[in-house]
Amino acid sequence: MRPVQNISTFQPHRWREIVADRIQKGREPDLSEHVVMEMMRSIHEEAIRQQEMDRIQSEGSFFQTVGKDRFSG
């Protein structure tokens, strides 16, 4: 969805908002800031990996379709 809307995979301002919120919420069950940051980093890295894979697969499908139309006939 992001490539269609021309939205960057990584949005630093939004990332800072989310991390600050999760650190605050992690204090309630007595989680250290370090633990919350490590969890957020892991989740963030996996989300970016999946988005990039989706983008690559989507581009591959597009080029396969374009190639078929251009060279068929």
Image (cartoon, rainbow, N blue to C red):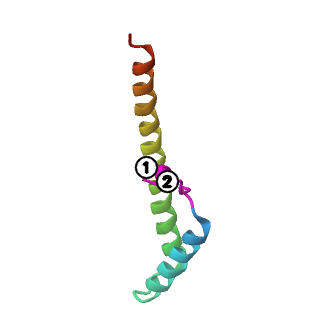
- Disc sitting over residue 36 in the figure: none
- Disc sitting over residue 48 in the figure: 2
Q: Position of residue 66 (x, y in %)?
A: 44, 26
Q: Which residue lies under the disc numbered 1?
A: 50
- Three-letter amino acid code at the position of disc 1: Gln
Q: Is residue 10 above or below residue 37?
A: above
Could you give the CA–CA distance between mark 2 and mark 1, rounded to whole angstroms?
5 Å
Q: Position of residue 34 (x, y in %)?
A: 54, 75
Residue at 46% across, 43% down: 55
Q: Is residue 46 above or below residue 57?
A: below
Q: In this picture, which residue range is highlighted in magenta?
A: 1-10
Residue at 39% across, 27% down: 65
Q: Quadrant of residue 43?
A: bottom left
Magenta stretch: dominant SS? loop
For label 1, the crowd category at 10 Å Cα-Cα, with few meaning under 14, some 14 to 19 and many 20 or more, is: few
Question: In this view, which residue lies farthest toward the top?
Answer: 73
Q: Position of residue 61 (x, y in %)?
A: 40, 32
The one of 26 and 32 positioned closer to us in this rendering:
26
The one of 38 and 44 positioned closer to us in this rendering:
44
The one of 55 and 71 positioned closer to us in this rendering:
71
Location of the C terminus (image quadrant): top left
Question: Could you say whether the residue bearing mark 2 is in a helix, strand or loop?
Answer: helix
